[in-house]
Image (cartoon, helix red, strand yellow):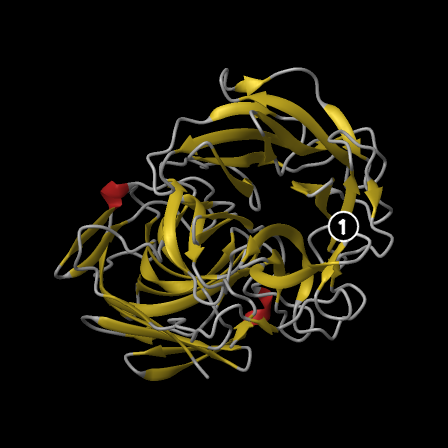
Amino acid sequence: MMIINPVLKGFNPDPSAVKVGNTVYIAVSTFQWVPGVRIYQTQDLVNYEYCTDVLIHSDFRGNPKDCSIWAPQLSYVDDEFYLLYTEVISTNRPFKDGHNYLIKSKDIKGPWSEPIYLNSSGFDPSMYHEKDKSYILNCIWDYRMTTPNKSAGIIMQEYSREKQKLIGEPIKIFNGTNAAKTEAPHLYKINDYYYLITAEGGTGVDHQVTLCRSKALYGPYEVDPNTPLLTSKEDKTLPLQCAGHGSLIMFENRWYMYHLVTRPLLKDYAVLGRETAIQELVMTKDFWLKLKSTDNKPLLKIESPYQTTSQFKHYFKDDFSTNKLHHEWNMLAYYDSSIFNQSNQGLEITSKESLQSLFDVSLIGKRLTTTNFYAETAIKFNPTHFNQMAGMGLYLNVENFFYAYITYDEIIGKCVRYFKKEQNVFHLYETKTPIEGEVVIKIITDNHMINVYINHMKQDIEENITFLSGGFTGTYIFLSTHDLNTFKGSKATFKYFVYDELK
């Protein structure tokens, strides 16, 4: 049996894994989507399932695109889970405003403690435990550097679990290599060595995993002479690109590394965003970790430790008949339960602001897991003004989205219209589809093209999905309601939602 990469398809970046008992837990970044921090679980490395969401009551309203929750890190000590994360407020150079926090829980599914503030000196914090002591690592940001990226290495500081605060002074333990942009530190003790893994080169096409080691906790750390441990940068034809940001586990006496990748369309367009993959590692005779394969490139398939059949479910249907939104759904910036009402009639969404708002958007979104998919919903909505909208679309971030929506036109009345925003430039399509009553909207993408069907009739709308790429996030399929005349002024009912991958 083979493990097929990526193991977490769609927008699931910056994996951090910890094994507790027979279960491996993987936390991933969520950025502007809430709940903040998603955790998956597996017991065979082949099949992965949703475990829990952590920062349920996050409020990221007003944060710019590509900000909010970055690079969570999971660890486990003394029968307790620790989760570290950065909340980034601004990435405008030369500064980077972000704050590092720690929460903990006896149970992976919570309840989790209130956040404990750590520091604001950098991002990608992680925790290392040894005997009765713990240490916090993060990259250090130096605004004085003349390069665009100002990651100046990795610092470490002791953390008192008893006092629940950092103690002593931070010490720089690693300056990084010429690959630069040193971040995402993870520290492991294996036999006589401390192994420090970092991400370098930036999270784009030059991304890599760098490995170094020392026999002393605070160093000095020597870089693996065969660095990088993992990268895609030397071969732009690989199906898995941007490989980096590694996290180690031992499973069935074998070393594995989770890491992020992209699967770009036409070599350049990572519509799905950064996903999670896994590689097997081996220890060399001179005590360096390396990929089990013959080089340092990410593989699409690796050998499974078990003869297990993959049970990945690509089909999703929601009739909204329960009293709680399904965990497949995320919200933008903030979850206001008062605007989502589920019943046997479907999901009623009360309107708020437009899709370009950084504050209050009445929207639920599901990660795309492929760029060839089928999505369908049926909507009851009776607008009386062009500023009233309800529909389904594709959303990358506040500057890049596509929307097929029911609205009102002064000449033809109720109709479906279409717009997109690409690189923050708005385009309203001239096409108007007159409609009555309940409306079925389908979005089907195939061979990179977005196709729209209204009441099962194909519309004169074709858009290349590749514009929904770039930045730190991935594309979602979404349902939303808007009223730009009156805040919470309109309601639309979504009878069901169906999503399936096309072969």
Q: Which residue occupies the foreground of this view, 113 or 239?
A: 113
Left/right placement of residue 401 relative to residue 486 reads: right
Left/right placement of residue 148 relative to residue 249 reads: right
Hey, which quadrant is residue 366 in on the image?
bottom left
Q: Tell me where residue 475 appears, x and y as whole percent.
A: 50, 61
Q: Tell me where residue 365 appears, x and y as whole percent.
A: 39, 57
Q: Amino acid at mark 1?
A: Thr
Q: Is residue 203 visible?
A: yes
Left/right placement of residue 353 relative to residue 264 reads: left
Q: Which residue occupies the foreground of this view, 322 or 479?
A: 322
Q: Which residue is mark 1?
A: 210
Q: Which residue occupies the foreground of this view, 183 or 427?
A: 183
Q: Tell me where residue 502 appears, x and y as whole percent.
A: 43, 81
The secondary structure type at the circle numbered 1 is strand
Left/right placement of residue 365 relative to residue 222 reads: left
The residue shown at (85%, 36%) is 146
Q: Is residue 99 above or below residue 448?
A: above
Q: Residues within 10 Å of mark 1 (few under 14, many from 20)?
A: many
Q: Is residue 361 visible?
A: no
Q: Which residue occupies the foreground of this view, 449 or 228?
A: 228
